[in-house]
Image (tube, rainbow, N blue to C red):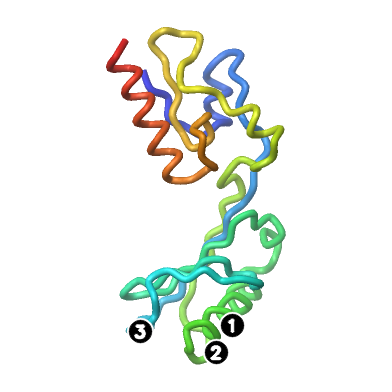
Amino acid sequence: MILAVPPVVAAALVPGLETPSEFRAIVNAHFRLAPPAELAPMIGIVNGTVEWLFAFPDRLSVTISAADRLLEVPREVLADKLWQEVAAVAGLPMTLPPWQIVRERRATFAATPGENAKRPAAPTAWRNLWLAGDWTRTGLPATIEGAIRSGNLAADLAVRS
């Protein structure tokens, strides 16, 4: 069996399993409008609240990591603040388009030495149980690539057993 669940769930299901227990938020904002044709599909932004801007055919989306500082900002205030930055980068009017804010309080484990040390390997004390997830010991930060790597490793171990 491959257990691919968040670390809090894995710790509750597997006796004695130590997992990361401190987390960081990610905030995403989505603005419904067609981006300018010349806008790059992905833009990194330095010295702003917005960190990443993604252009899709029907919307512009923002990602902000380690965003705990933004969790209590009222949604309308946050949407307006983020849009001002997006509009400046994309050369769009400052008028706020239809929007949605998504806040994930436990998006990633805290990337600290102490939390990193709690990342378990895929094999467990049971010969028929392996762990998968970006929070396991992947050699990468908590990323999609890390999650894929851990899933592939867990599947390889299961097949070889």
**Can you tell which mark lies on residue 84?**
1
Q: Earlier in the sequence, mark 2 or mark 1?
A: 1
Front residue of 98 and 43:
43
Q: Earlier in the sequence, mark 1 or mark 3?
A: 3
**Which kind of residue does numbered mark 1 sit on?**
Gln
* Residue 8 in picture, x, y percent from top left: 58, 31
State which quarter of the image contains the C terminus: top left
> Taking 10 as reference, is 112 above or below it?
below
* Residue 54 in picture, x, y percent from top left: 43, 69
* Residue 66 in picture, x, y percent from top left: 64, 54
Foreground mark, 1 or 3? 3
Tag 2 and tag 1, C-beta contact below 8 Å = yes
Tag 1 and tag 3, C-beta contact below 8 Å = no
Q: Describe residue 69's horizontal placement relative to residue 158 as left or right.
A: right
Tag 3 and tag 2, C-beta contact below 8 Å = no
Find numbered disc 3 in the image and state the secondary structure of the residue it sits on.
loop
Q: Describe residue 23's horizontal placement relative to residue 146 as left or right.
A: right
**Which kind of residue does numbered mark 3 sit on?**
Glu
Q: Describe residue 92's horizontal placement relative to residue 153 as left or right.
A: right
Front residue of 18 and 142:
142
Q: Report the residue at 51% width, 22% height from top.
A: 121
Kindly identify which residue carries mark 2: 94
Packing grade of label 1 (10 A; few <14, some 14-19, many >=20) is some
**What is the C-alpha distance between the residues marked 2 and 1?**
6 Å
**Can you tell which mark lies on residue 38?**
3
* Residue 146 in picture, x, y percent from top left: 45, 39
